[in-house]
Each structure stands twice: as structure tokens, then as C-alpha cells.
Image (cartoon, grey):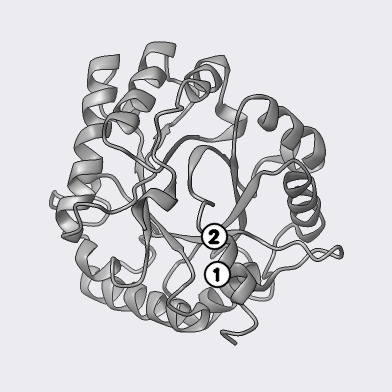
Amino acid sequence: MIAVLTTFAAATQLAYSGPGAWVDIYSPRELSRPEATVAALDARGVRTLYLETANHRRGRSQLIVWPRATERFLDAAHARGMKVVAWYLPGFRDLDADYARAMAAIRFRTRTGERFDGFALDIEATVVRSIPVRNRRMLALSQRLRAAVGRDAVLGAIVPDALSTTCRGCLWPGFPYRSVARYYDVFLPMLYSTLRRRGAAFAGAYTRANIDHVRRRTGRPDLPVHPIGGLANPLTGSEARAVVGAATARRATGVSFYNVRLSGPEEWTALRRSPGLAPLAWWW
């Protein structure tokens, strides 16, 4: 299996670098016109497309929700020199189904031979209410994925923000950052500052604090981090610029906003002003 995934491993070195954009399975406009979406993202300076392939809410047999659109996105993005990272949202209730869907993305090939440049697991579902049980299942799935792709592949972990992991009764109290870091190389925290407080000063400070938080909790001060700002639609131009500026100041490997259908000129303008981001190769 590791030999089969050698191409995936070799292609992921820079996949999480620079300005990014997110498309989920609930984006009908983008999914109906992948080539036009990719062309628009390329014109806006996006270097990596993060494309959701499935989530745990879909039927067990639905490994790739929109296979034809996925194929078209990959072909179009690679034709323009863009990277594409697959992401999947597991529920941790049925680990075999979660594993099958994740591996379907990792193994996916277009009819022209294109494949994803990376894979990231979206770690946020609360279907399993018990935190100890949820932690065990999440780490068990992560271990299986790492064993499947080998040590050389670069895997991403999409993780909750600091406020969602450091309070009682929040999304994921006591999130096991250090344990998760055994299996994943890049952390992509969901820093939706507009859900916390408004203003550019707060957006920048919250981005810096979350990058520092992830590195401190994993015990890896040089950890590659790609902050996800947003939700994009409420962000002002100054808030979006503050997110990108904070990511640059903390030598993040990339930065993005969630998601494409919610993004406007504020986000695209801010992303075009992010030349100072550290490419992932800088960390190796």
C-alpha cells in the first residue's frame, strides 16, 4: 500500500503553502463549474484548493460524494499549476467507514492520472459525546491513516480553535494536540474570529494567539501551521488583512478563508498581499 501512495507522498511537500481556498460538498455553484472556479481562484493568486470529498453524514457507501466534479477540479487545477488537498470530515462513530472514505480520497485518480497533492482530516465532529471515547477513536483513525500512507507523506490536521478546546462544555475540551502531532505534519486551525469578536485588532491578535497555541500544545515550536480565517462573509477588509498579516508575522506556511462561496473582494485582496508566508519546504 505504501508503494502505491509514493506519488502522493512526493507531491505533498508544498501542498499546504501560500494562499488557499476551500470548497465543500455543499457548494453547488462551484461544483457545477469546476473549471471556471479554478480559473477565478488562479486569477486571485490562490495556490492550493482544499476540496472536501465526503463527510460522515453521507451514506456509508458514498466514498466520494461528487466524483465527476472532483475529477474536473483536479484536472483543471493541475493544468494551472495549482495544488489540490482533499479533506474529509469523520464522525468517529463508524471508524471503518471513516477510514474507507479517507482512503478513497487519498487513492483517487482522474482518468488522466491526476491525484490529490495532500490529504487533511477535519477533526471537529461531536457525534461521539464522550470526550475520552472521541479522543481514542480519533487517534485510532489517525494511526490507521498514517500507517497506510507511510511516514514520508505530509498529512494535515484541521483542528478547532483555541477557545473551542480550552473550556468546559465547549466543542472539544482538552484537545490532545501532542498526541495528534504524532500523526500529522501540518495543523490547520479553524480561526473563525468573527464568531468571537469583531475588529481588525482582535482578528490579528486571535490569529497570532492560535498559531502560538497550536505550537505550544503540540510541543513543536517549528510546527507548520496554516490558519483558516473566517467565516469569510462577515469579515471586513481590515479584518481579512489582519489575519493574513498575523499569519505572515508568525511564519505560517499558508493562510486561507472559509470558504469560496462566502468569500469576497476583502478576502481575495488580503490573500494577494501574502508573499511573506513561509513555504512548507522551509520547515524541512
Above or below for 56 versus 244? below
Labelled disc at residue 79: none
Q: Amino acid at mark 2?
A: Thr
Q: Quadrant of the C terminus?
A: bottom left
At label 2, counting other C-alpha atoms closer than 10 Å, the crowd grade (few under 14, some 14-19, many 20 or more) is many
Labelled disc at residue 9: 1
Q: Image quarter for residue 2? A: bottom right
Give the residue displayed 64% in from the left and 71% down from the top: 7
Q: Nearer the viewer, residue 159 or 8?
A: 8
Q: Amino acid at mark 1?
A: Ala
Instruction: Find residue 263 and report its horizontal and vertical position in percent.
Output: 56, 25
Mark 1 lies on a secondary structure that is: helix
Instruction: Find residue 96 and report its horizontal and vertical position in percent.
Output: 52, 83
Give the residue displayed 52% in from the left and 51% down from the top: 14
Labelled disc at residue 12: 2
| Whether residue 163 can be seen here | no
Give the residue displayed 39% in from the left and 18% down from the top: 241
240 left or right of 30 in image:
left
78 left or right of 151 in image:
right
Residues at circles 2 and 1 in contact by the CB criterion of under 8 Å:
yes
At label 1, counting other C-alpha atoms closer than 10 Å, the crowd grade (few under 14, some 14-19, many 20 or more) is many
